[in-house]
Amino acid sequence: MKILVIEDDPSLREVIKSSLEKERYVVETAADYASALFKIEDYSYDCVLLDIMLPGGSGLQILEALKKARRKENVIIISAKDSIEDKVNGLDLGADDYLPKPFHLAELNARIKSVIRRNNHGGESRIELGNVCICPSTYEVQIGGKPVEMSRKEYDILLYFVNRPDRLINKQTLAESVWGDHIDQVDNFDFIYAQIKNVRKKLKEGGASIEIKAVYGIGYKLNTHVK
Amino acid sequence: MKLHYRIIGRLSVALIVILTVWAGLFYFALMDEVNDEVDDSLEDYSEVIITRKLAGERLPSHNNGSNNQYYLQEVSEDYADAHPHIVYTDSMVFIKEKNETEPARILSTIFEDDDDRYFLLTVSTPSIEKHDLILAIWYWIMFLYGALLLTILGINVWIYRQSMKPLYILLHWLDGYVLGKENRPLTNPTNITEFQKLNSALRRSTEANERIYEQQKQFIGNASHEMQTPLAICRGRLEMLMEDESLTETQLEELAKVYETLDHITKLNKSLLLISKIENGQYPESSDIDLNVLVRKYLPDYKEAYGYKQIRLDWEETGTLHVHMNETLAAILTTNLLKNAFVHTAEQGHIRIHIDNNRFEISNTAEGGALDRDQIFNRFYQGSKKEHSTGLGLAIVATICKIYAYRIDYIYKENSHCFIFFFF
């Protein structure tokens, strides 16, 4: 899988690059409008991360160029602007997703995966991790082929972790992602703990090959290499 | 109190005093003249009698058809010496023809004839006629007084209204003026120097205010905007560092604390950016929104997240509150008010939510006393510092209410903070 990161800030570019390389992607970078256009004309990629404000031009112009050339690259816009207009413009022009800065790297990885999956399997896709299989269209969870009953929140939590395997997940981030942005000032995470306890129990009872581990003081991590 | 009422009030007090004094003086002057006339006629009358008496002519009958009467009697020289020769008095007189006693003006004159005899002549005229005259004069003065007062006040009001027109146009314009919004230009043509100066001063100061407001808004927007990328870098680097397997647990914990603080900055920044976006009108679309539905949607999440506080919750709907606003902003408004209540309620406290057809009221048990009403909707004002709170929640609520011109109010009652959102 090859990814092109178009971002003008060198430090952020480097962070994204090394994070993606950890996920075993091949990562190319471009720092400005002109070099980005060069790369796009010469090579093809599985996914393009696109910053909107670039030296020499707008990321939206690059997006236009891509779509005009009928290229199949998945495009995720990463922008500091976080304005609805930009989001609407970008999605109208054919971007697959929009991620406002500052984002979590885990979130970025999940979005890349989901975008690639969506486009490769035409949307109807099952997510498999170890012997756990999730079907997002029907909200079904199977462990080793056997269906497991899960509540809405339990399902959301499992899906979130399965999309971010082996990543450290901050409990605050988890709360905001699963419950919503409005749960952003809690000072006690017992409610997350209660839900996660149920998910872990169900995974264990079903004999799943993955497990959610608590990381003291920070949050959780989904381990895929369970002995 | 309106200026013209104040002016008319003061004018009427001054006029009442002045006109009363004037009317009084006028009345007394007139009365004096009337008495004078009466005395003159008495004098004439007595002169006629005296002349006739001295000339030895026949005296007129006691009553000559008018109500005037006279008495003539001889007095001793001693009496004449002991009394002044001409005396005017007011007293009661018996009128024989009418057979009754009436008040009268009396002139007593003592005179001496050629034979050195002294006579006392008393002429009198009833004061009844004088009384009628006085009454007539009194009425007329009162009428004049009233008419004059009303006319002067009326003219003053009219003149005042006419010459103060530019002031009222100015005030009307100011009433409709909202800083940071599209305001209609001030058109107030006048050739009065003072008002011209006022117009230009107001224009200048509003323009300066607009400029400063705009700059401040831009600054906040730009500053929080420019911080997004550095924040993303910090966050990314920390996340990568924290995934390093070689870290010890204590190191990881320290990093987690840094991460938490960074998260807080990110949130602050997001909230500032949100305020700036709301103010810049970046949420233009509006639709009809049922606030009850929003509360019902978000309330369970807060109940769950703050379950450990064991808050007693009263949730009452006595009507449906429909608002016309942007959907995202309506959700932000609702969640911020709910969040504020849950965050600032102590354990085992009490939250009461009440929605009817035109208001949404949410109150929570207060930990301290009342909060400063003037400051509570300001940015970063916090009654008691809460660790995870940005101090911007209510500022966001106030900003949203401001752009839609809805009212949000804070009151402190029965040991509770109570926020009321009005929709009319």
Image (tube, coloured by chain):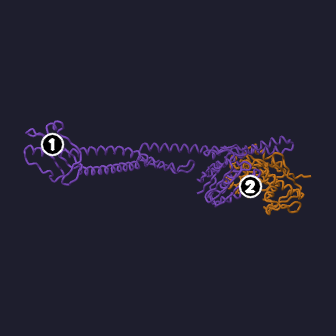
**Residue indicated by mark 2:** B301
Instruction: Give the chain ID for the orange colour.
Output: A
Front-most of residues B373 and A203: B373
Mark 1 element type: strand
Residue B380: name its quadrant. Answer: top right
Residue B287 visible? The answer is no
At label 2, counting other C-alpha atoms closer than 10 Å, the crowd grade (few under 14, some 14-19, many 20 or more) is some
Three-letter amino acid code at disc 2? Asp
Q: Colour of chain B?
A: purple
**Residue indicated by mark 1:** B120
Q: Position of residue A119 (x, y in %)?
A: 78, 59
Q: Position of residue B17 (x, y in %)?
A: 36, 44
At label 1, counting other C-alpha atoms closer than 10 Å, the crowd grade (few under 14, some 14-19, many 20 or more) is many
Q: Position of residue A46 (x, y in %)?
A: 79, 54
Q: Earlier in the sequence, mark 2 or mark 1?
A: 1
How many marks are shown on the rendered structure? 2
Residue reaching furthest to the right: A227
Residue A97 visible? The answer is yes
